[in-house]
Amino acid sequence: MTELPKRDYKKSDFNSSRDVKWCPGCGDYAILAAVQKAMAELGRPKENQVVVSGIGCSSRFPAYMDTFGFHSLHGRAPTVATGVKVANPDLDVWIVTGDGDGFSIGGNHIMHAFRRNLDCVILLFNNRIYGLTKGQYSPTSETEKVTKSSPYGSIDAPINPLQVAIASNASFVARTYDINPKHMVETFKAARLHKGVSFVEIFQNCVIFNDGAFDDVIDRKVRADSTLELQAGEPMIFGAEKEKCIVLDGFNPIVKNLSDVSEDQIAKHDPENVHASQLLAHFANELPTPMGVIRKVDRPTYDGAVNAQVDEVVNKKGKGSLNELFRGKAAWTVD
Amino acid sequence: MNAPIETISIDNAVIRFCGDSGDGMQLTGNQFTDTSAIAGNDISTFPDFPAEIRAPAGTTSGVSGFQVNFSSNAVETPGDQPDALVAMNAAAYKINIEDLKKGGVLIVNSDSFGKIDLRKAGYESNPLEDNIALNEEYEVYEVPMTSLVQEALKDVELKPANKKRCKNFFALGLMYWVYDRPLSHSEDWVKNKFKGKDLLIEANTKALHAGYNYGETCEIFNSRFNIEKTEMEKGLYRQVTGNTALAYGLITGAQKANLDLLYATYPITPASDILHELAAHKNFGVKTVQAEDEIASIGIALGASYAGSLGVTASSGPGICLKTEFMGLALITELPLVIVDVQRGGPSTGLPTKTEQSDLLLALYGRNGEGPVPVIAAKSPVDCFEAAYEASRIALEFMTPVILLSDGYIANSSDLWKIPNAEDIADIPVKFKTELDGQYLPYKRDAEKLSREWVKPGTPDLQHLLTGLEKDEAGNICYDAKNHSDMCKARQAKVDAVAKTYPKTEIYGKGSGKVLVIGWGGTFGNLHTAVTEIQKETDDISYVHLRYINPLPNDLGDIISQFDEIVVPELNLGQLVKVIRDKYVVDAKSINKIEGKPFKVAEMIEQLKSFL
């Protein structure tokens, strides 16, 4: 695929004329704006942008984009996206999914999109609740959560999407959050520019059914101490005064005061190191929540490989002839 | 010394090879079939094998069989009953002996009737010894094949177990002698198959000759048979199975539409061979995706169609159930898609390797909401080619998912294919919309076909939304009552319009009269043969075989009205008959069989005659 010249777009060029029908205050608005801004800044041909979604609040996303959009079936967006991208690898495929869509009903497909390394961006709008069905617990909801379907508390243990992505060999894994537009735009752009499957978990607030679900991590008052902004090659330092850091004690990451350690003791972020990626995905509780690009490695894409194999066989055997196909190896003539 | 062996000329013969599933019976049967076809006979085959790849050796659950009917006349079925049965072990004998025609030839590998073999087969004593009646009913030949092969291969440096494996070629050679067939095709096949493995070439060739020579020299056989060449139209011929023909039809459909073919599927019996075939033909621009599951495979195929390829998926009943939600999405977004259902015995996992026609109602109605989808059926192995091409045509011309019904019987069976010239096959015109002219309305319909325009992602200015939600002509999500009613009716009208493109329905027999038999799908060979037989005595019976089941042909109502009695034979408990009764409000009668096996000509003649 040749790189196309960058086009001049405004964010509004990606706005469809349709009224946006998410609840007032929903985190989805900010994500929509950030995706449109990222697309405008990247300047890739608008007609090549294909947004495929499943079912759920977040999956209404393609309706609000002035791009090609396919609002498909619950959990199945990765399958449609796979067909699109394999049929035409020149397209920029975006998958929009939610925690229920992507990790409950569609868990099987997302895992296979990861392992195949389908060249696409997968945006997970994780609000840890079922919104469109009006408030049941989701596969990322915390245990004991009280919802309409769990009045005595949910007994389900939550799944960690980043761990699933890394375990399934996703080649790009990142996390961002809906109240930081700049962070989202940069993360989405990096995801788009990565060749391969780019998985971005977005902490997204559901103002109606799970308001403040991520406040303990991303609220301005606590964010500096509870998140870890990752930069490839840089030491893992965080805190309101940049006074804390991550140190590895054997296999255990621990938080230390910067003043207590020497510089070479501080863990450096290496997005290609699978062990480090797994550790970061697991960060919770006393460890800060990682934000930014957690993992980025290069490996062949599925869509590229499918098409390369076709080209290879055409080169080797020549373009197929139907008459030769019909005859096969054992035809005979009756005179 | 016996009298010289007499060679008897006969019109046709049905033979069956049966043995353990590891004995290579499918291969042996295919070799015999190829040789017979090349020798100039018309052929029809029926492989019958267990779902278990290697059930415990020597047990009845592991018995695999292959039947071939070869003739100096045209044949349409693999034959009701074998004239000759080759049983490689006691279990195979037990499973198959009932089917052998009285007076038929029975050849058994007597080395596989030892104590252990008998116990595995569930015999307390040797049925060959116990059964005095056996020799009265059949021409029985006990041949110690295993030891004869060991002896023939004593100078070949192979392990005894490997030598033993050549016994199917001994059986093949022997049958070549009995039916006076040349060895050359199988000799060439062995050379090709085992290229570079000289010992295996030597062993199999020797076993083949040993079998042939055994017939020639052992002097136990009373007679051998000769079957003259079939009078056939000039042209190029080959043997083809339904699944192979179906794969070729899909490739042809895509090529004639100038599109890439994307075939996404999940392995399932008896549809997997279509994938195997297509995966080998990537030089036709065929992309094959072995998806993570059934749902994914139809989603991937639909995504490919959306992006401008011909998307195709296939499965059998259990997988088709899983695909139904996506069929709804395909029909409401009005994208072309071919869904192949190679039917097998159901419900649930059912009978994976056995045939049935019991998915018809699933295909016709198995979707939520008003979900009309064209449904067509293939009638024979060779016909799978045309049916697949036709399914592609309808899908592309009408922008709709199409269900193509095949079945386990025609999928694995083969018959003789008079190979068409590719240039004689019509193009399928496909036109993508590429320019914006005024307002773009994704669901604006063609006046005649009522189909919408196809726009590939990547086309400037034609960005649009597809959704499984109800929408208006502009593609906007729309829950308006009248809009929904109009859209449901428009989608139905579009599918109904497909019938305008059908050829005239062919009637075998008179256009009016007493009994009209209506068949569909893979029962054609047996029904047509049965009706033709009855027609030799009376012209009170006529026959229509349906390719198109949804929508039904526009002329079918008139045809039905010309007959006193409508009879619908099916391999289910009565599915097409329901549709016929419903659509034409006639008291159609049903003939059913639900045994995992095709109809037999004889039973069909008997049952049809009861209506005369």
Image (spheres, coloured by chain):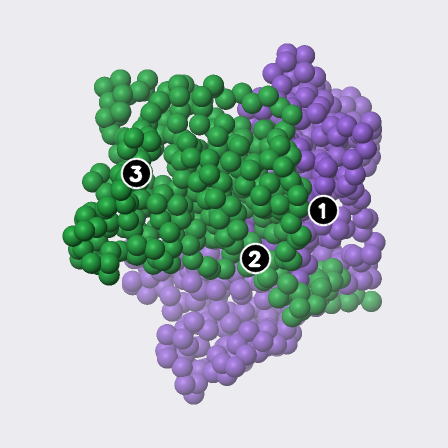
Give A280 or B254, whichever is nearer the viewer.
A280
Residue A47 position within the rendered picture, expressed as x and y whole percent measured from the top left: 67, 41
Residue A167 position within the rendered picture, expressed as x and y whole percent measured from the top left: 34, 50
Q: Which residue is mark 3?
A: A224
Q: Chain of mark 2?
A: A
Q: Which residue is mark 2?
A: A304
Residue A309 position within the rendered picture, expressed as x and y whole percent measured from the top left: 58, 62
Residue B79 position within the rendered picture, expressed as x and y whole percent measured from the top left: 61, 51
Give B288 or B136, whichever is nearer the viewer.
B288
* Disc 3/disc 2 C-alpha distance (Å): 40 Å
In the displayed structure image, the side of residue B454 where residue B292 appears, left or right: left
Chain A's colour is green
SS at mark 2 in the image: helix
Kind of residue indicated by mark 3: Ala
Q: Chain of mark 3?
A: A
Give B480 or A280, whichever is nearer the viewer.
A280
Q: Quadrant of residue A287?
A: top left
**Residue at 45% over, 21% down:** A25
- Residue B531, disc: none
SS at mark 1 in the image: helix
Quadrant of image for the N terminus of chain B: bottom right
Q: Is residue B320 visible?
A: no
Q: Chain of mark 1?
A: B
